[in-house]
Image (spheres, rainbow, N blue to C red):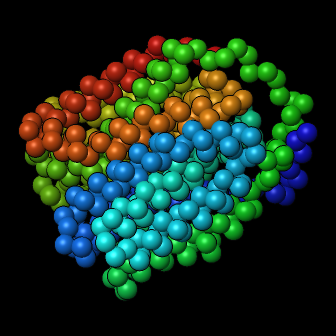
């Protein structure tokens, strides 16, 4: 039988998990932007090789995600998240000691295991196990905190790089996992502890339709592809539209605040509506931004960044809240792992695919992401509420 958590422990859950998630994202997803070049240079390689290793890490995370989600369904998230901190520390430690490109790739593959066990999908499944169908608010809460992962991670990685070097920066992140993220995850409830008593829960109804699951997996894959493609190539895309280099960088800097502002909106006004409604609005934001950029050129760079960032911010939350609202809490972790596995694979390929399109077509490459963004919106319109 599940135990109801004492009131004094409830306020710590979102804060502890949110900070641990910030560390997880900052020390994995966001370190190539700062450390890839010096990593590659130390082995006389092109940075493309390091980004290739990072892509392998994302494929590994897609493979391990369903297992991690199912494990969280059975025993709760605390043990899995603590294990992820140990795996993150091991992978980062191997990177710091890498004496050959092969060891570098091994370190990134182990980081991929940590990403599959310790980033948003695992955190969302943990919250679903604690809060049940009431997890939408807490899921939004941790994305609000972890939305600053790049804001914290890039400067800290850069500071460690400038002060000591890239190997010491990796070692520093490993120590942060062991000294801060792991103890924070250890504060989370055990698998038998719940915010709401199980007696208050009702059956989730019939199994979700295969059609709805496939549509949602498609939506997640498309939105992760677009998000990663823009993260890798936004300055070049905006300059292809006619923006100056300075304008492109300034516009790109607006994406983070736009994501956080949209998540605040989701936490406030949009939480009154079904997550399907906010997801439909968010999915349509990137195609609308593309029309603005092609129609008005460089001067629309800021509008493009704001629209894309806002849509991406809400869609990150929808990846956790939408499966919960549509299919219920039973089996949520494993289902979320399977739903996001195709997305991780496409995410790994996104920089290469969109980079090739941008090189071949220039600004017109935006119709690739806009087109599949429209398809994602149509897929969401085809899904009916449970």
Between 79 and 22, the residue placed more toward the observer is: 79
Residue 366 picture quarter: top left
Residue 224 picture quarter: top left
- From the top left corner, tell me how far across and down residue 247 is, in percent: 19, 55
In the image, residue 349 sits, relative to residue 119, either above or below, namely above
Between 50 and 134, the residue placed more toward the observer is: 50
- From the top left corner, tell me how far across and down residue 314 is, in percent: 48, 38
Please state if 187 lies on the left or on the right of 318 as rendered. Answer: right
**Residue plotted at (9% across, 36% down):** 361
**Residue 144 visible (yes or no):** no
Please state if 177 lies on the left or on the right of 192 as rendered. Answer: left
**Residue 176 visible (yes or no):** yes
- From the top left corner, tell me how far across and down residue 143 is, in percent: 55, 49
In the image, residue 93 sits, relative to residue 327, either above or below, namely below
Q: Quadrant of the N terminus?
A: top right
**Residue plotted at (39% across, 22% down):** 377
Please state if 327 lies on the left or on the right of 212 as rendered. Answer: right
């Amino acid at each position: 039988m599940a135990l109801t958590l004492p009131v004094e422990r409830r306020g710590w859950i979102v804060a502890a998990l949110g900070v641990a998630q910030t560390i997880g994202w900052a020390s994995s997803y966001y370190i190539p932007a700062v450390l890839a070049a010096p990593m590659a240079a130390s082995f006389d390689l092109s940075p493309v090789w390091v980004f290739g290793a990072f892509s392998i890490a994302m494929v590994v995370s897609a493979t391990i995600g369903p297992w991690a989600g199912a494990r969280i369904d059975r025993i709760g998230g605390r043990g899995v998240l603590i294990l992820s901190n140990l795996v993150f520390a091991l992978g980062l430690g191997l990177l710091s000691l890498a004496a050959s490109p092969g060891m570098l790739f091994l370190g990134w593959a182990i980081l991929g295991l940590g990403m599959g066990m310790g980033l948003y999908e695992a955190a969302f499944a943990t919250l679903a196990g604690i809060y049940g169908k009431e997890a939408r608010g807490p899921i939004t809460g941790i994305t609000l905190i972890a939305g600053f992962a790049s804001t914290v991670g890039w400067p800290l990685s850069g500071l460690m790089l400038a002060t000591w070097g890239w190997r010491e920066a990796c070692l520093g992140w490993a120590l942060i996992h062991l000294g801060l993220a792991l103890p924070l995850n250890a504060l989370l409830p055990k698998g038998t502890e719940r915010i709401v008593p199980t007696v208050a829960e009702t059956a989730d109804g019939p199994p979700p339709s295969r059609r709805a699951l496939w549509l949602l997996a498609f939506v997640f894959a498309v939105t992760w592809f677009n998000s990663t493609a823009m993260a890798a190539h936004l300055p070049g895309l905006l300059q292809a539209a006619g923006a100056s280099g300075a304008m492109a960088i300034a516009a790109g800097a607006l994406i983070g605040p736009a994501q956080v502002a949209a998540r605040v909106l989701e936490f406030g006004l949009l939480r009154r509506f079904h997550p399907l409604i906010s997801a439909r609005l968010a999915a349509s934001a990137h195609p609308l931004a593309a029309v603005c950029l092609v129609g008005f050129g460089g001067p629309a760079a800021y509008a493009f960044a704001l629209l894309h960032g806002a849509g991406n911010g809400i869609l990150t939350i929808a990846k956790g809240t939408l499966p919960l609202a549509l299919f219920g809490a039973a089996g949520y972790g494993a289902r979320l792992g399977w739903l996001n596995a195709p997305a991780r694979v496409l995410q790994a390929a996104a920089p290469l695919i969109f980079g090739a399109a941008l090189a071949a077509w220039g600004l017109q490459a935006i119709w690739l992401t806009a087109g599949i963004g429209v398809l994602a919106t149509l897929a969401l319109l085809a899904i009916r509420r449970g």
